[in-house]
Image (cartoon, rainbow, N blue to C red):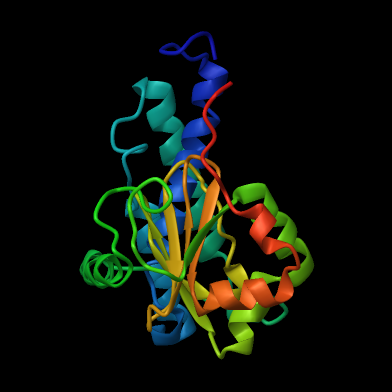
Amino acid sequence: MKDRYHYTSEALNVFPRYNVLNAIRVDLERLDPQKLQDFNSTKELILIAGSTADDDSTVNPIGVFAAEAMVNERKLFCKFVEGLCDSDLQSIEPLPYQRVLSQTEADLLWSRIRKRWQITEGYWFPLAECSLPDVVAFRDHDIADFNANNKLDDLLLSHGIQRILEMREYGPEYEQDVTLFDPQYNGAEGYWTSEDLDWIVYASHESTITVGGWLLEEIKKHWPGWSRRIWRFELPS
């Protein structure tokens, strides 16, 4: 890269490929794996995604080099998929369930989540007011340490939670297998819960992780000294 607005031809032959593959991945994740039919019909759906998937990073390529790189990457992807046969997949271990929510699903879920957890702004507690008694904010690195030793997904599994919902400030939102639970800020505010909305986790851009509902009580049971890890606002010295 030369500067913020000008790229070398080498760069334009590389990063647009990542962009188009990411767009294809998101399109594929819109498919519900439990509703897919036979091998050939599924293959056709994958080829359609490979040929047509777009997002904000692919619809307006930066010049001819970037456009050609994306076209080439699509062709390589589709060529690989076309060459697959049923036997090629027999030794591949299935991935955990993950599906991109439709806009209608996401809108309905957001309405329910905001009402249940008093989320009235783009941000939530501790960056916004919340009067609920079962909500505590921690520092993100402390929750990461707790998760490394206690496994938040195990706590969810112990309560029969198999699928979770990952909701974001922007970008794809998911229904996914509980083993994929990884509450981190990724550039967009993140919220995690499940269908009953009786627990919640919120990761903010201020390096906080907020936990609410029964999951908070489970964390307290397994985390001696948890109260010393509560996030507190500190004025700059």
- For the residue pair 81 and 212, the one nearer the viewer reads as 212
- Describe residue 212's horizontal placement relative to residue 57 as left or right: right
Residue drawn at (53%, 8%) of the image: 2
Q: Position of residue 110 (x, y in %)?
A: 27, 65
- Describe residue 99's horizontal placement relative to residue 142 as left or right: left
Instruction: Tell me if residue 20 comes above or below residue 32 in the rendering.
Output: above
Q: Position of residue 172 (x, y in %)?
A: 38, 56
The answer to whether residue 159 shows anywhere in this view is yes
Q: Quadrant of the N terminus?
A: top right
- For the residue pair 193 and 48, the one nearer the viewer reads as 193
Q: Position of residue 135 (x, y in %)?
A: 46, 65
Instruction: Tell me if residue 182 comes above or below residue 108 in the rendering.
Output: above
Q: Quadrant of the C terminus?
A: top right
* Quarter where residue 234 is shown: top right
Residue drawn at (65%, 72%) of the image: 220
Residue drawn at (29%, 72%) of the image: 116
* Quarter where residue 119 is shown: bottom left
Q: Residue furthest right?
A: 149
The answer to whether residue 96 shows anywhere in this view is no
- Describe residue 207's horizontal placement relative to residue 202 as left or right: right
Residue drawn at (43%, 50%) of the image: 126
Q: Position of residue 139 (x, y in %)?
A: 61, 49
Instruction: Tell me if residue 201 comes above or below residue 76 in the rendering.
Output: below
Instruction: Tell me if residue 193 comes above or below residue 17 in the rendering.
Output: below
